[in-house]
Image (spheres, coloured by chain):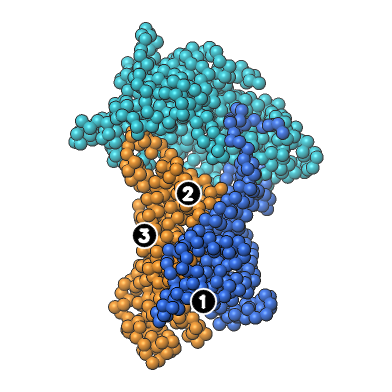
Chain colours: A blue, B orange, C cyan
Amino acid sequence: MTQTVVDKAGRPPTRRAPRRVPYLVRQLVRLVVTLFAITIVIFGLTAIAGDPARDILGQYATDDQVAAFQVQHGLNHPAPVRYLDWLGGILHGDLGISYQSNGPVWDVISPRLGPSIVLVLFAWIVTVLVSVPIGLLSGVRLRGRRDAAVTFVTLIVAAFPEFVIGLILAIVLGVWLAALPVDSTAVSAGGLFDHPSAYVLPGITIALGTIPYIVRLMRANARDVASESYVRAAVLRGIGEPSLSLRHILPNAAPPVVTALGLQFAGLIGGVVVAETLFGFPGVGQLLAQSAASRDAPVVEALALLIGTVFVVANLAADALVVYVTPKLRDQVRA
Amino acid sequence: MSADVLSNVSAADLAAPRQRRWRGFFAIPQAATGVTLLVLLLLMVVLGPFIAPDPPNKISDQPILGPSAQHWLGTDTYGRDILSRVLHGGASVILLPLLAVSVAMLVATVIGLLSGYLGGKVDAVVTWVINIALAIPSYLAVLVVVAAFGSGGLVVVTAVAVVYAPYITRVLRSATQAVAPREFVLAARARGESLSWILFREIIPNIGPTLLVEIALRFTYAIMFIASLSFLGLGVQPPSANWGVMVAQNRAMLLVHPVAVLVPALLIGVLAISVNLIADALTQFFGDRIHERLMV
Amino acid sequence: MTTPNLSAHDLSVGYRSRDGLTQVLADVSIELEPGRILGLAGESGSGKSTLALSLMGYRASGQEQLSGRVDFAGRALSGASIKELRRVWGSRLAYLPQDTATSLNPALTVENQLREVLRRHRGQDGAAAARRGVEWLERVEIPQPEQAMRRYPHQFSGGQQQRIALAIALSVGPQVLILDEPTTGLDVVTQANINRLIVALVRDAGIASLYVSHNLALLATVCDELAIMYAGQIVERAPAGQLYAAPRHPYTAALIEAVPTIEADRPPHGIPGIPRLSVPVHMCGFADRCRYRVAACETDIPLVPVGDGRTARCVRVDELPPFEPGRNDPAPAAGTAATVRQRAAEAVPAPAPAILAVDGVRCAFRRPGGAEFVAVDGVSLSVPAGRALGIAGESGSGKSTLLRAIAGLVRPADGTISFQGTPLAGLSGQRSVAVRRAIQIVFQNPDATLNPRHTIYQSLERPLKLFRPEVSRRDRREAVAEMLRQVRLSPDLLDRYPRSLSGGQRQRVAIGRALLAQPQVLLCDEVTSALDVSVQASILELLVGLRAERELTVVFVTHDLGVLRAVADEAIVLQNGVVREAGPTVRLLREPHDPYTRDLVSAVPSPRRAAEFLSGGA
């Protein structure tokens, strides 16, 4: 294809670097390297702590018991060897042995995966459906008092720690209005969708942890874009709503929000852990908290790796989406 | 990391010292509200132990009492006076996050400054480390540390400090990179000013406001994070009177004695809100855009 | 005289902010006629952009119309509903905004943006719209229009983006076109081409046009009529050629004299003070800067006809002799630019040793994508002591990079820079104190050249501390105050912060800071480009004067050939990091040898040769 457009400065293109590896391949490599680094960090953190045998078995444990525990969990080997074992095991699907149950970590985790996934999806959908329109409207339309009100409310909601929000919701909706169950343990009995109402309170709690940030970001972006020169130029060409918001503002304001949604997933995790604990929801979040408290490192490591992987993948997907949607970036990565 | 794709922070995004003096700051509604709330809470935390009717851990034989003349907020499952526990329980909720953020701030500022100004290999290494750190959600990292080292205030403070340092470094690095190409810095370089002069006398005064906003924001997050960890039983341990611990312990009484749970919970909320309001007011006052651009 | 299409009557507009109401336009009356281009000239605070938008009936937030009205095709525009306005905007009234690169939505293809307006205002869609779009892309000289339709704005250069914006504006067939600084920020050559295009298209279609700009020479070249704005009022209006050759208002005359041109033998004269930012109350807005001021100037002054269809707003317009810019000045005092030039011209060129030599210097950067970008590609030059060398070029030519390499801020990848015969280290940190002292640099951006957190005294003190330790602490303050006086600033400013100084004042401080080191070479990087014309002229006057007093060697980077002429004895022209031509400034501008230089010179707007300019070019 011949170059039909003259280079920006009107001069022949500068000497380019050799043709680069396609964007997706580059990102995949990045993914693998990052995951690898994460495993090292996770394992490293636990390895630094030293031998947990005595802490777990208690102060009355005999030396024999301690020794037996160490052998059982391979703690008598040096750290690099343990790391490689662990890593090797993961690649074969073996996540290790729990300190608490002495059984495979996978068996501890797997029944809880389903409910948590549903819960997170629910929370995420609520987040997107609520925050994008509010943010867009607030940034483009609202001014003065109403805009300040929206800002104020988002600020307040953002500042409340999730467990406080969850508690308030529990008290208001669960106790006073008795509209929703405060205890979600029922979810573990029966199929995933047998008790839909049990998902609501924890789901909303999680969503409320993220919504304020997305609303603020969307609003700020929409505001910025709305005051951009090309939007005013469009206005002066006679373009009105809804065309203005949807064709001119949204496509330019959205990309950072997509990225933020990916990054916010990290915040979601805290919300999941707290909400599940608060409502007794039998998911991985609750397991994570319990295992951390009981110093069950293998379970925590496995969960951290699992969730961490999802996080990294989600972010790379968000980035790829942004690049795909933004014409300027699309060209940049192709270069 | 991924956000770098979009984050092109320019000098215009940098917080700028305001024309008007601090009086203008208090004119912002969030500022006045936030500072007032914070001061009130601090008063309560400082004076609390002196005005509490009972020692916080004094067990009595009257568990789960509703509010009464003798116990204004009632008692918990161990018969301890809730009001007293509340008055004693604020110190660690404020101090631990403060400690964590201070340590993180110190380390991160130095690294961020040097990395942002010097560029080159130093910057490449620092960026690489930051990217790895950002790839692990902070909650997870702290939970891993707690699983390995055990629960407790000190562990949590260290973990939070270590986990937050990369985020702070990123902000400061960006801010430094926005200031470094400005002509007055170039003029200093052309004059041959020393590195420490340039960093301390030319750059830092101009990223000061960003630093302030960052401290305020981090403090907010740290308060929420550490309270949340205490709620999970991973931070400050019982029988310590800590608002987060109280929420966890009194949760069982939610249906019969909600006040016991609500009061400490709301106090945490109000504390976080007050600091968040101050952070927001600072952002407005200085016109800081960096935090929005970096989505921190 | 044909009936005007768009007109404003006694329009007064103000902005309401936290500090109250500021009036920015006062009693402005203007008419646009089909097929004629009215130019609107002014500096910062003149209100020209506000007027342009008000003529559209557009109100920015905080803007209030205080009195008067705007009419279009017999109906009132001011006070019309947003619905009515939207019907008119884009279809009969077109607006080409100031920011050339962002009048186009980066997320939509060219085709989409063209079709959007055609669909909305002419009900055209599909193939018909696409065809018309391609037609118009051709008319604005976009190469390969069919492919261009499918591209996104960022894939075009700034000049091409503006052509596309023009196409979008004109494709609907408007009756009026308002252009707000449409070519500011573009290359001189691109500017010239686009302006020629605009004039041709507008005259062809009989569109009534308003062209707003700060570039008086440009307006005088392309417009039929000119109106000068100052402090929210029109102070003079006349046919373009007449106004430029024989202005009647003191401000107009002063403004014309402040513009550096490539032909003039006279250096530009600055106007003391700074442009007024708001409408004056019961007095002439220009009075505090005018040398013909009398007591009678302190009343409301109306715009009065002064013959030949011209108007002017000055009480003394009848009694003042007609201005002839350049010829009416009293004999220049010694030490001013004129005498320097004279002396330089008269002096027998003794073979002065080269104080600064650049030999085969190459500077390259690594782009974010990994590609290498060569900013300076094998440039050699030498500057004899005491002379002024001008480095001219467009943006991207490498001139700033070259200057920074000389200053020690950018390390050359290749080649040497020598001072007094000795090669210099690449970075200033590695150079000796003596060298760092001898070579000083002043930058372009007045907003960033001083540390906002240091007082003026603190900023000025540094070079003394570093380079003149013999000046004791006690004497420092006096030395700094003296330097302020030499750059025509009051020592009262010493304890103020940069934010309370104007752009011109800050640049003077920056120059003072450089001179306090008592350098032998002064490097100036576009030091006046960010300033208003009248302020720019004062700074240039200052530089030329200071240079004469201290026998300074000056290397001056600029993209403005008029400034080059005003300051430099010798000049080199850079393009894409390569020297295209070098030689004495006057000769180079009068008879350029190199084709690029020739293009550059012929692209400079010249009111005296307007017809030539308009027909010139591709």
Residue C156: image x %, image y %? 64, 35
The quadrant of the image that shows the C terminus of chain C is top right
Task: Please tell me which residue lies in front, C128 or A123.
Answer: A123
State the separation of the CA atoms marked 2 and 3: 22 Å
Q: Examine the rendered structure and indicate whether residue C134 appears above or below residue C221.
A: below
Considering the image in quadrants, where does the N terminus of chain C appear? top right
Of residues C65 and C505, the one drawn nearer to the viewer in this rendering:
C505
Which residue appears farthest toward the bottom when viewing the image? B61
Q: Residues within 10 Å of mark 1 (few under 14, many from 20)?
A: some
| Residue at (47% x, 53% y) in the render | B130
Residues at marks 2 and 1 on the same chain: no
Could you say which quadrant of the image residue A195 lies in? bottom right
Mark sitting on residue B102: 3
Image x and y of residue A229, in percent: 58, 43
Residue C417 lies, with reference to residue A145, above or below; the image says above
Q: State the CA–CA distance, disc 2 to disc 1.
A: 38 Å
Look at the numbered discs 2 and 1 and tell me whether their residues touch, using CB distance below 8 Å: no
Q: Quadrant of residue A172?
A: bottom right
Q: Residues within 10 Å of mark 3 (few under 14, many from 20)?
A: some
Q: Residue at x 26, y 35 (%)?
A: C465
For marks 2 and 3, the one nearer the N-term is 3
Mark 3 belongs to which amino acid?
Ser
Q: Is residue A79 visible?
A: yes
* Residue at the spot 59% in from the left edge and 82% down from the top edge: A178
